[in-house]
């Protein structure tokens, strides 16, 4: 399985687990910093979780930008496929092991300092707008939209 296919499978399983836990998530979520979170999820009480998906050890070693996501979330976790060498991942991070059908939490989501209220509001508004745009594109794939974000 290619890294891209493995990452999509892990994302699907992680989203299924998050949904069962009461979180609503969006993949490929653009942050105002210019980075794109693999998954950004919101809880019912407006907590923000970012999940960084790593499909292989080579993927983890090649990409160290995950630390830049910590200022954009209340909670953070990695999601990896079964067989991933877990000792590569930082001990203080949350951890899910996932396949295309489900995921299991191996370490609780790692909490950092709460994000500022203005940033939380901006993230929630961006989340709502992006979700609405994606739903609209599903209903009307031929529609041209300006200002996609």
Image (cartoon, rainbow, N blue to C red):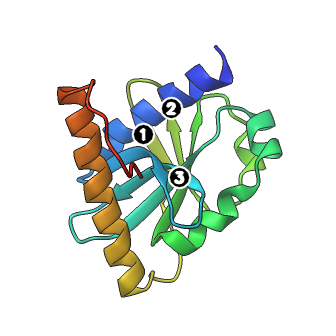
> Upstream in the sequence, badge 3 or badge 1?
1
- Which one is closest to the eye, mark 2 or mark 3? 3
Residue beneath the point at 39% across and 48% down: 148
Residue beneath the point at 22% across and 47% down: 132
> Upstream in the sequence, badge 2 or badge 3?
2
- Residue 7 image offset from top left, x and y in percent: 57, 30
Return the residue found at the far top: 1
10 Å crowding of disc 3: few (<14), some (14-19), many (20+): many
* Depth order, front residue of 74/71: 71
Element at label 1? helix
Element at label 3? strand
**Residue 22 marker:** none
- Residue 4 image offset from top left, x and y in percent: 61, 25
Answer whether residue 78 is visible to the viewer in this image.
yes
- Left or right: 127, with 95 as reference point: left
Residue beneath the point at 82% across and 44% down: 61
Q: Are marks 2 and 1 in contact (CB under 8 Å)?
A: yes
> Label 2 vs label 1: CA separation?
6 Å
Write down the residue under mark 2: 10
* Depth order, front residue of 114/149: 149
Residue beneath the point at 36% across and 85% down: 117
Write down the residue under mark 1: 14
Element at label 2? helix
- Which one is closest to the eye, mark 3 or mark 1? 3
Write down the residue under mark 3: 37
Answer whether residue 20 is visible to the viewer in this image.
no
- Left or right: 129, with 74 as reference point: left
The mark tally for this picture is: 3
* Depth order, front residue of 139/15: 139
10 Å crowding of disc 1: few (<14), some (14-19), many (20+): many
> Label 3 vs label 1: CA separation?
14 Å
């Amino acid at each position: 399985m290619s890294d891209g296919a493995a990452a999509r499978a892990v994302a699907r399983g992680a989203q299924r687990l998050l949904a069962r836990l009461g979180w609503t998530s969006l993949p490929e979520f653009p942050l105002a910093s210019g980075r794109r979170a693999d998954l950004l999820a919101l809880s019912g009480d407006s907590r923000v979780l970012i999940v960084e998906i790593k499909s292989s050890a080579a993927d983890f070693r090649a990409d160290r930008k995950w630390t830049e996501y910590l200022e954009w979330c209340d909670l953070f976790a990695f999601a990896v496929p079964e067989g991933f060498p877990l000792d590569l991942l930082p001990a203080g991070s949350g951890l899910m092991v996932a396949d295309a059908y489900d995921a299991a939490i191996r370490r609780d989501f790692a909490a950092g300092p709460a994000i500022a209220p203005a940033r939380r509001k901006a993230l929630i508004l961006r989340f709502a707008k992006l979700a609405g745009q994606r739903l609209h594109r599903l209903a009307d794939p031929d529609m041209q939209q300006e200002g996609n974000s």
